[in-house]
Amino acid sequence: MAKHAVEANFDGLVGPTHNYAGLSWGNVASKTNVRSASNPKEAALQGLAKMKRLADRGYVQGILPPHERPHIPTLRALGFEGTEARVLEQAAKASPSILAAVSSASSMWTANAATVSPSADTTDHRVHFTPANLSAKFHRSIEHKVTGRSLKAIFADESYFAHHPALPSVSHFGDEGAANHTRLCAGYGEPGVELFVYGQVAFNEQASAPEKYPARQTLEASQAIARLHGLKGQHAVFAQQNPEAIDAGVFHNDVIAVGNGNTLFYHETAFLNEDQVLANIRERLTGAELEAIRVSRAEVPVEDAVASYLFNSQLLNTPDGMLLAVPGECREVASVSRYLDDLVKSGGPVTSVEVFDVKQSMRNGGGPACLRLRVVLDDDELKATHRGVIVTDELYERLTTWVEAHYRDELSQDDLADPMLLEEVRKALDELTGILGLGSIYDFQR
Ligand SMILES: N=C(N)NCCC[C@H](NC(=O)CCC(=O)O)C(=O)O
C-alpha cells in the first residue's frame, strides 16, 4: 500500500552578497549581466514572496539557508594570509575573479544543492540525499560541505533519512544535483521513475558532447548517485541531454524540461534520443500513463525558451490539475506568452499558469525552478523534518524583517572587498541560524 506523501519545496534564501560576477560560462544570463549592480535586498524579498505565495496555497514550503560569503577559509586555502581585512584586500588586488567566486550567493539555486530520492524508490526505504559537487564551476564547487550540513540538520533522523557525501570533485563526476533530475510517478507516495539527464559521458571521448559550452553533468555521476541511493533499474532512466541545447545556453536540463507526477513538459530539443527516453520511462512507470507535453521549435524556438526560462517553471499539483509557476520573463517573449495561453486552453494536465517575479535571480540564470529543491516526504518523514525551516506566516514576517535589517539594496563588484560587508554577513547569518534553529552550520560559528 503506497503511503500518503507530499512534495515539499526547499527554496534557497538569497544571501546578502547576491551579485552579478559573470562566473558561469555557458549560462547566457550570467554573462549578459556581468558587472551590473545587484540589489540583494530585493532579490531576497522576491524569493521570500515566492515562497510565501506557494505556502499560502497549501504547499509545504521550506527554506535552505544562504552560505557564508565571502568565504575566508577558501581564500586562506589559496594562500591569502593575515587578518580577514588583509585577506580580502590581497585577494581583491591579486585576483578580483577569485574574490568574486568566493563571494557568490549561488547557493540560492537549491535545484543544484543535491539529488534527492524519495523513500518509495529506494531499496532501504529511506529518503536519500547527495549534495552536488558542482565541480564545473569553482564558485559553486565550494558549496557542498555547508549544503550537506544544512540537509543533515533539517533531515536528522537516520531511521528516515540517509546522507551521502558529494561525489569526487573532478570533471569525470561533475554533478549538478536535481537540476538534471526529475521524478515521474502516479502519486508522490507511489514508486516512481527517476529521470537522470547528463550532458556527457566522461570516460568515452567518442561520445557526442557539446562543442561550445561545457556539459556540467556526466553519466558517470548520475549512475553513481543512483547506486548510492539504492535505485534499482525499474526506478532509474538515464538520458543524454541534446548537445545542441547545451550549446544554445541550456546549461542544465531544468532549463528545457520539467516533470511532475505523470507529466513531462519538455522542448523537442531537450533529449538526444527523445523516443527512446520516452519509451524507457513508459516501460517503468506504474499506475499511470506518461503525459508527454512536447513543445516544438515552431511553437517556441530554443532561444526563446532560454530567454524566457519557460521550462524553469515549477509544475505543481492543484485540486483540478497542475499549476505552472512561470517567471515574469515568460510574458515578455511573444512566442512563449502565446504558447502558455494555448497550453491552458488545450485541455491537458496544465490547468493554470501564474507569474512569479524573480528578476534578480533571473539575471544570473536562475528561474523559479532553480530556486527550489524538491523533497518528497511521507507523513512520518514530514513529521521528522525540522520545523524551524518550514515557511509559516510568522517565519515569513521574521525573515522579511531580518532581510530589511541586514541586506544592502545595492552591491557592485568593488564592494566585495569591503570588510564591513563580511561583518554584516556574519552578523546576519548568526542571527539567521538562531531564527531557523539550525545550530552552528557555518565555518565562522565553529
Ligand atoms: N538551472 C538551475 N538549476 N540553476 C541555475 C544556476 C545559476 C547559476 N548562476 C551563477 O552561478 C551565476 C553567478 C554569477 O555569474 O555571478 C549557475 O550557473 O550555476
Image (cartoon, rainbow, N blue to C red):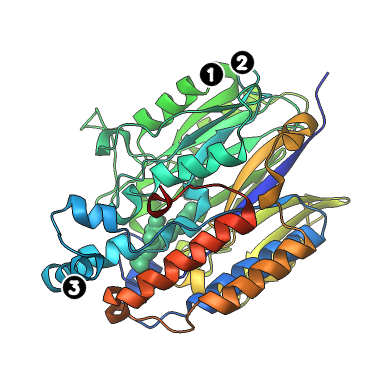
Separation of marks 1 and 3 at Cα, in angstroms = 47 Å
Q: Earlier in the sequence, mark 1 or mark 2?
A: 2
**Residue identifier under label 3:** 89
Asked if 55 appears above or below 3 in the picture, the reply is below
Neighbor class of circle 3 (other Cα within 10 Å; few <14, some 14-19, many 20+) is some
Left or right: where 173 falls relative to 81: right
Amino acid found under the numbered disc labelled 3: Glu
Q: Crowding at label 2, few (<14), some or many (≥20) Cα neighbours within 10 Å?
A: some
Residue type at numbered disc 1: Gly
| Disc 2 from disc 3: Cα separation | 50 Å
Tag 2's secondary structure? loop
Give the amino acid at mark 2: Asp
Q: Is residue 243 left or right of residue 325?
A: left
Residue 345 seen by the camera: no
**Helix, strand or loop for disc 3:** helix
Secondary structure state at the residue bearing disc 1: loop
Question: Residue 124: which disc?
Answer: 2
Q: Quadrant of ligand 1?
A: bottom left
Q: Nearer the viewer, mark 2 or mark 3?
A: 3
Q: Residue at x 61, y 41 (%)?
A: 154
Q: Nearer the viewer, residue 367 or 157?
A: 157
Work out which quarter of the rendered image holds the N terminus and state it. top right
Closer to the eye: label 1 or 2: 2
Earlier along the polypeptide chain: callout 1 or callout 3? Answer: 3
- Give the number of the disc on residue 230: 1
**First in sequence: mark 2 or mark 3?**
3
